[in-house]
Amino acid sequence: MSVLYVYAITDSSAEPQLVGLHGAPLQRIEGGELAALVSEHPVAPELDEEVLWEHEQVVEELMSLATILPLRFGSSVERADALIAMMAERREEFLEALDRVRGAVELSVRAELPPPRVEDPPPRARSGTEYLMQRAEHERREREAVELVHRPLAALAKCSIPPVGPHDPRQFKAAYLVEEAGVEAFGSRVSELNAGLEDVRVSCTGPWPPYSFVAERSA
């Protein structure tokens, strides 16, 4: 039994003349107003760096031809009818998401904030309350620094996934959905932030397919 490897969902009627992973031809699985762009394989492709980049290249080529909702590596089904049923069940969600990402790309921003300034000798909390106040002040400064980066970039985007930094509060990563015509201005704003914010390093990568904006969880 073969599997259908799914690259994207689209509402375009175009028939892309492309090949998928391992040279397999791309196929359209129709589902009403939607279609899934797939390739057929004897077994699900296994993850490795080369195959991952091959997947990304296919998705980026599709994005250059039509509005798509890109699926992340590893999305596969065994039967076309299961895929058709999924598109029917999530029809409204997919159509809304396609409208959201139409004409736009994803830009990924990372920012590294400066560490808290340490006085010499460092102040020592005389009580638990004083320690908690010092810690709260450090966290407040970190949040303010994040906003100094995020707010002006979010203003240039259709929507964004707010910055999070679960491992290190001085670092964050955020995703921005930006109109294709606004990509250059967004990059210029990143450069301005790097020049104007002392000790804050900001980097931007992309444009990417809008993976982060497929689901309705953006602001």
Image (tube, rainbow, N blue to C red):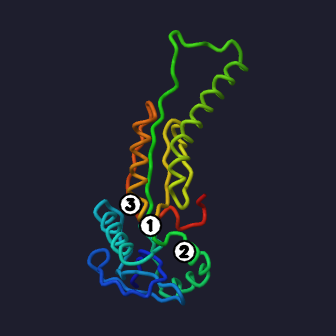
First in sequence, mark 2 or 1: give its number.
1
Amino acid at the residue labelled 3: Pro
Secondary-structure class at tag 2: helix
Q: Quadrant of residue 6?
A: bottom left
Looking at numbered disc 1 in the image, what kind of residue is underneath it?
Answer: Arg
Q: Is residue 79 above or below residue 122?
A: below
Q: Which mark is residue 72?
A: 1
Could you give the CA–CA distance between mark 2 and mark 3, rounded to whole angstroms? Answer: 18 Å
Q: Answer with mark 3 or mark 1, whichever residue precedes in sequence.
A: 1
Direction from residue 143 to residue 19 in the image, left or right: left
User: As drawn, is 182 to the left or to the right of 160?
Assistant: left
Q: Which mark is residue 99?
A: 2
- Residue 128: give x, y in percent of width and height: 71, 19
For the residues bearing labels 2 and 3, Cβ distance under 8 angstroms: no
Rendering coords of residue 101 (x, y %): 50, 69
> Which mark's residue is nearer the viewer, 3 or 1?
3
Quarter of the image where one finds residue 49 = bottom left
Of the two numbered discs 2 and 3 on the same chain, state the one appearing first in sequence.
Answer: 2
Q: Nearer the viewer, residue 46 or 56?
A: 56
Residue at 33%, 73% (x, y): give it.
Answer: 61
Q: At which x and y percent is residue 178?
A: 47, 61
x and y, in percent, of residue 22 in the image? 27, 75
Q: Are marks 2 and 1 in contact (CB under 8 Å)?
A: no
Amino acid type of the residue that numbered disc 2 sits on in the rendered structure = Asp
| Foreground label between 2 and 1 | 2
Which residue is situated farthest in the top direction here? 121
Q: Does the CB distance between marks 3 and 1 fall below 8 Å?
A: no
Q: Which residue is mark 3?
A: 207
Q: CA distance from mark 2 to mark 1?
A: 19 Å
- Is residue 218 or residue 55 the one in the foreground? 218
Relative to 98, say whether 219 is above or below.
above
